[in-house]
């Protein structure tokens, strides 16, 4: 009988690790909660402001951004990969905890990619379903500089979160056809409803249900080349957390009035995110599950 308590304790620990992967997400310990001073046109991001933002690099050059959604998975855009599959995976790296591209610091963690899971229904003409998951070769260690973002469970959940502030971040150029910037930039944007974004003077019906527009009507804040795959992240005051609401997908040039940035709408992909991650769960995970059920039955036997 003496073994009963410790065994149950172990089982409970393992189960909670499996069933609530999103317990801790979307929190940044180094940066303050968003205030009311709007950042128009972008500025350098403070340290630790976007701990889920990663740089995906090919041969040590920034290629696209991505968002950490769990210790082993990074969410990015399909258009960052589908034309680059000819490049051997060993040339790709994912860098987290990075602020200055040319100077990764002691907080930076580097991983290679062990699988690329592109959305099956990605359409490279319309950019519909522009989401891809990257499975890392080994998990990120969560620190003040490296954290996962939360993901909305469905469209209703996204709407009910009643976001007060949304931001874009990246190393993309600050002007159309410009060069990458060395230091991570951030800008505050507003979500733009699909009906407005589809108006004939805006994107004229091009925006599908799987997309969300964000920017400022004036065009004063926008994502640009090099920001692809990165997060559109929104702050929930009720939960004091950030959610990745969009994945930077496309825009007509950059920062033009009536041509806001277009993002893959993550709340439309919650099911896909879940099944894709589950389907790729490795044999190691299965072994762990077997071990847990073994422990559970051992614990039950003792009851
Ligand atoms: C991650 O954290 C573990 C435990 O703190 C440590 O043993 C390991 O070396 C860390 N890995 C890296 C790559 O920093
Ligand atoms: C949407 O997500 C919320 C929060 O997880 C959940 O309570 C609700 O049942 C979901 N609704 C649907 C239609 O799946
Ligand atoms: C949404 O947030 C605003 C403040 O940002 C608040 O005034 C409003 O009552 C909130 N609505 C709901 C339904 O919580």
Image: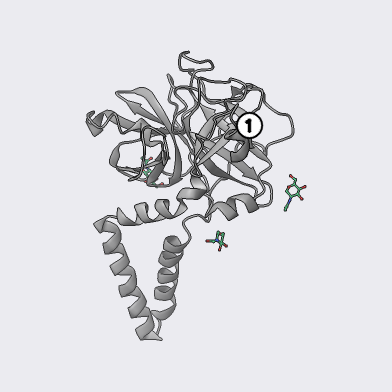
Q: Is residue 45 visible?
A: no
Q: Quadrant of ligand 1?
A: top left
Q: Is residue 219 above or below residue 76?
A: above
For image coordinates 48% across by 33% down, the residue present is 248
> Residue 140: percent from the left, percent from the top?
40, 43
Horizontal side, residue 203 vs residue 298: left or right = right
Q: Is residue 217 above or below residue 145?
A: above
Q: Residue furthest top?
A: 178
Q: Is residue 197 visible?
A: yes
Tell me how the rendering is colored.
one colour
For image coordinates 27% across by 55% down, the residue present is 282
> Residue 301: percent from the left, percent from the top?
35, 85
Q: Is residue 132 above or below residue 227?
A: below
Horizontal side, residue 167 vs residue 51: left or right = right
For image coordinates 37% across by 47% down, the residue present is 72
- The residue wearing badge 1 is 189
Q: Residues within 10 Å of mark 1 (few under 14, many from 20)?
A: many
Quick one: 147 or 122, which is closer to the camera? 122
- Give the image quarter of residue 198: top right
Q: Is mark 1 within 8 Å of ligand 3?
A: no
At mark 1, the secondary structure is strand
- Give the image quarter of residue 303: bottom left
For image coordinates 30% across by 68% down, the residue present is 291
Horizontal side, residue 40 vs residue 4: left or right = right
> Residue 236: percent from the left, percent from the top?
65, 47
In which quadrant of the rendered image does the N terminus lie? bottom left
> Residue 173: percent from the left, percent from the top?
49, 18
Quick one: 5 or 253, which is closer to the camera? 253
């Amino acid at each position: 009988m003496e073994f009963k308590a410790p065994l149950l304790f172990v089982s409970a620990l393992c189960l909670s690790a499996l069933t609530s992967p999103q317990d801790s997400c979307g929190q940044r310990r180094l940066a303050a909660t968003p205030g009311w001073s709007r950042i128009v046109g972008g500025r350098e991001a403070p340290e630790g402001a976007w701990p889920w933002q990663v740089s995906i690099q090919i041969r040590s050059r920034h290629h696209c951004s991505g968002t950490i959604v769990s210790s082993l998975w990074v969410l990015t855009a399909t258009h960052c990969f589908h034309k680059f599959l000819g490049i051997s995976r060993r040339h790709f790296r994912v860098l987290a905890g990075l602020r200055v591209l040319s100077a990764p610091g002691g907080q930076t963690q580097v991983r290679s990619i062990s699988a690329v899971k592109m959305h099956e229904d990605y359409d490279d003409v319309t950019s519909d379903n522009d989401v891809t998951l990257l499975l890392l070769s080994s998990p990120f260690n969560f620190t003040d500089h490296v954290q996962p973002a939360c993901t909305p469970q469905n469209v209703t959940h996204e709407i009910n979160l009643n976001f007060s502030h949304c931001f874009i971040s990246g190393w993309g150029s600050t002007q159309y056809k410009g060069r990458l910037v060395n230091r991570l930039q951030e800008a505050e944007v507003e979500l733009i409803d699909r009906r407005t974004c589809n108006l004939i003077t805006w994107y004229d019906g091009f925006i599908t249900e799987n997309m969300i527009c964000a920017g400022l009507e004036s065009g004063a804040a926008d994502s640009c080349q090099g920001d692809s795959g990165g997060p559109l992240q929104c702050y929930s005051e009720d939960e004091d957390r950030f959610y990745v609401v969009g994945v930077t997908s496309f825009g007509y040039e950059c920062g033009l009035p009536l041509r806001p940035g277009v993002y893959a709408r993550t709340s439309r992909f919650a099911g896909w995110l879940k099944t894709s991650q589950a389907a790729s769960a490795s044999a190691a995970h299965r072994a762990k599950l077997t071990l847990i059920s073994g422990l559970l039955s051992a614990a039950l036997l003792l009851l």
